[in-house]
Image (cartoon, rainbow, N blue to C red):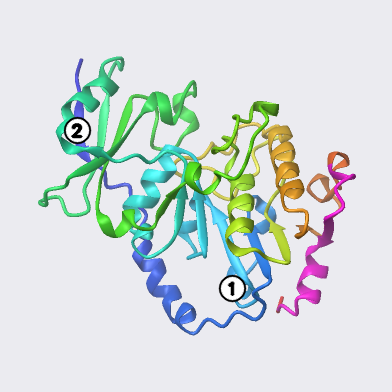
Amino acid sequence: MATSEKQDSQVWTFHQIQQRENGFLAQRYVENMSDLFVLGNGESRKNIDVNLLKAKGKVWGCNAIFREHVLDGLIAVDPMMEHEIYRSGYCDRNKVYFRDWENVPNEHYDMMKEAQVSNMKDPTIREWKHTPENWYANFVIHGQSTVNQNRKDDRWKGDGFDNVYITWTYGLADNNITLLKDIMNDYFGQGWEGDKLGPDDPGWSSGATAMYIACKVEKPRRCFLLGMDMFSTTDFINNLYKETMGYLSADEGSVTPQNWITQMARVFNRYKDIEFIKVNPDDNNKISERLPQWDIIPNLSYWKINEFYTKLSLDF
């Protein structure tokens, strides 16, 4: 069994984004601390100016949105995305929430690596250190079977099978990471629809998880949901980051949204005192339809994007 090892250079340069946004963030004045914006990565978010939202309230999001924006909170639930976020430097100065990010002492390095590659045909070790020449006490490791279980090679750009992700960790970034099991320990799952029995991380998708944690941390009066597209207007995947590292290819079929619908309903019901507003495109398409599964939820309403911009006095 051949094993190739290399320092992983496929890292998004967060520091360039930080420099671009720093001037704005340093002078940031939030007009309404009672408003919260939780951003999904559906394509209906494409033309929304995130910086305008930052002046109106707290802004949270998930996954690859960090490549473009610095947010008040960032959620990631998939190991490959967690490694990308950590390696970019985003965690050095910003709060992130990860599902599976456990530090392992360096004396277990050989054993853990061998355990990951032992069942791989042609493994590649994707290893990263912030400063390669430095000594590190701990690392985080994920194997391909954890990252892309039962998925085809060509579904993930630049990835494929038989990868082991090893990221050496350091205190500056580690101090800004919270595990979902620690922040969601007040969620008592009932074992329905795949939920784990609580209190614990129930294993939800990133969008519903971002909603839950953002509402818990920020305690808003209103929570606006943008880019939370349950459907696609075509037969193919609806995501702003398709065709990029860690995301499905553009020719993949659209995703069945039932789990998202169920999980988000749990969030609406958990935070009954918060007014949730789902912001939809102005077009009359499948993304803009009201969901019958949510008709009985009293603290949910729908706005079109033009209505949203007008009521919040946002510039188009």
Q: Which mark is residue 54?
A: 1
Q: Position of residue 172 (x, y in %)?
A: 28, 60
Q: Which residues are magenta?
A: 294-314
Mark 2 residue crowding within 10 angstroms, few (<14) / some (14–19) / many (20+): few
For the N terminus, the image quarter is: top left
Q: Which mark is residue 5?
A: 2
Q: Earlier in the sequence, mark 1 or mark 2?
A: 2
Which residue occupies 70% across, 57% down?
225
Residue 304 placement, left or right of 176: right
Residue 157 placement, left or right of 111: right
Q: Position of residue 255 (x, y in %)?
A: 67, 34
Which residue occupies 78% across, 64% down?
305
Q: Position of residue 248 (x, y in %)?
A: 54, 36
Q: Work out whether residue 232 can be spotted.
A: no
Which residue occupies 48% across, 62% down?
68
Secondary structure of the residue carrying numbered label 2? strand
User: Does 151 appear in magenta?
Assistant: no
Secondary structure of the residue carrying numbered label 1? helix
Q: Does 69 sit above or below residue 266?
A: below
Q: Nearer the viewer, mark 1 or mark 2?
A: 1
What's under tag 1, amino acid-wise?
Lys
Residue 131 placement, left or right of 41: left
